[in-house]
Image (cartoon, grey):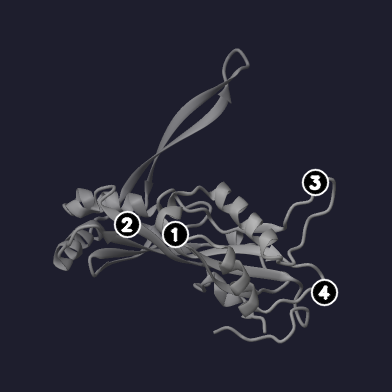
């Protein structure tokens, strides 16, 4: 539960965590363009955001793990810093930012976080997702596919990666390598919901499980609706290794 603080500089420094939604057609906008979009929005709404020092100052802003193209986000995060001595309430900040947002973008929270808090990207350990089928699917059919998949001793995913290495002539060439990973230990929850699938997956720096890969395995188990492009995918929220959502570390400003 959020704790309300009266003064922005009372306890912590000027670190802010912004929670927002990215849905509709903007789910096809890439991560870098979303960053530029928020930079412009901050300037246009006169947000007292802090800039870096030096010859090319830029807004102090960082984001949580980027979404794959086409995936909607209902619990996305961005960390910023405000200028020393500035004050703006959460209610006013949300109002100003949402006045700048286009259809499909919506700021839902503006929270003060501890000065020593790690960035959202570093804190993220897991995330939950929802796959919503475009056509009507019986819940029993979804459950059967999930039971078949999770009853397996292992769920092996072949990963293909490309790296640049020096050849015998000293030139860098692209080399393709493959590895096989058992992703079953990193699927923490997989449930049938109304016309869809709920997933709670590892999203750490080492074991990052893509929900689309899980859906592909369900398709192989006979769930035809789990075929690529036959469902809408949503990231619902992000969590730390303590099991807390990233917005649980902040408090509202009044």
Q: How far separated are the C-alphas under marks 4 and 3?
A: 23 Å
Q: Earlier in the sequence, mark 1 or mark 2?
A: 1
Label 4 belongs to which residue? 85
Residue farthest to the right, as pictured: 54
Q: Is residue 246 above or below residue 64?
A: below
Residue 239, percent from left and from top? 50, 68
Residue 16, percent from left and from top? 67, 70
Q: How far separated are the C-alphas under marks 4 and 2?
A: 44 Å
Q: Earlier in the sequence, mark 1 or mark 3?
A: 3
Given residues 70 and 46, the one toward you in this image is: 46
- Which residue is drawn at the image coordinates 60% and 62% (left, top)? 78
Q: Secondary structure at mark 2?
A: strand
Q: Is the Cβ of the residue at disc 1 closer than 8 Å to that at disc 2?
A: no
Q: How far separated are the C-alphas under marks 2 and 3?
A: 40 Å
Label 2 belongs to which residue? 232
**Can residue 123 be seen in the rendering of this structure?**
no
Given residues 122 and 228, the one toward you in this image is: 228
Residue density around tag 2, few if under 14, some if 14–19, many if 20 or more, within 10 Å: some
> Is 239 situated left or right of 212 in this image?
right
Given residues 77 and 145, the one toward you in this image is: 77
Quarter holding the C terminus is: bottom right
Label 1 belongs to which residue? 202
Residue 23, percent from left and from top? 43, 60
Q: How far separated are the C-alphas under marks 1 and 4?
A: 39 Å
């Amino acid at each position: 539960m959020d704790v309300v603080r009266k003064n922005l500089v009372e306890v912590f420094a000027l670190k802010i965590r912004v929670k927002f939604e990215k849905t509709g057609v903007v789910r096809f906008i890439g991560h870098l363009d979303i960053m530029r979009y928020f930079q412009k929005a901050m300037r246009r709404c006169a947000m007292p955001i802090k800039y870096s020092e030096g010859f090319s100052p830029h807004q102090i802003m960082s984001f949580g793990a980027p979404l794959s193209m086409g995936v909607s986000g209902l619990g996305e995060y961005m960390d910023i810093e405000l200028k020393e001595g500035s004050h703006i309430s959460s209610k006013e900040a949300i109002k100003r930012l949402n006045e700048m947002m286009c259809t499909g973008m919506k700021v839902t929270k503006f929270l003060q976080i501890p000065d020593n808090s790690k960035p959202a990207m570093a804190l993220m350990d897991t995330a939950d997702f929802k796959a919503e089928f475009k056509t009507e699917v019986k819940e029993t059919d979804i459950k059967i596919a999930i039971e078949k998949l999770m009853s397996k001793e292992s769920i092996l995913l072949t990963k293909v990666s490309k790296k640049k290495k020096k050849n015998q002539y000293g030139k860098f060439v692209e080399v393709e390598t493959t590895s096989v990973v058992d992703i079953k230990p990193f699927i923490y929850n997989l449930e049938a919901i109304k016309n869809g699938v709920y997933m709670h997956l590892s999203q750490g720096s080492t074991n990052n499980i893509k929900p689309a890969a899980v859906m592909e395995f369900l398709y192989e188990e006979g769930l035809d609706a789990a075929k690529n492009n036959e469902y809408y995918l949503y990231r619902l929220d992000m969590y730390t290794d303590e099991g807390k959502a990233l917005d649980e570390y902040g408090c509202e400003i009044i």
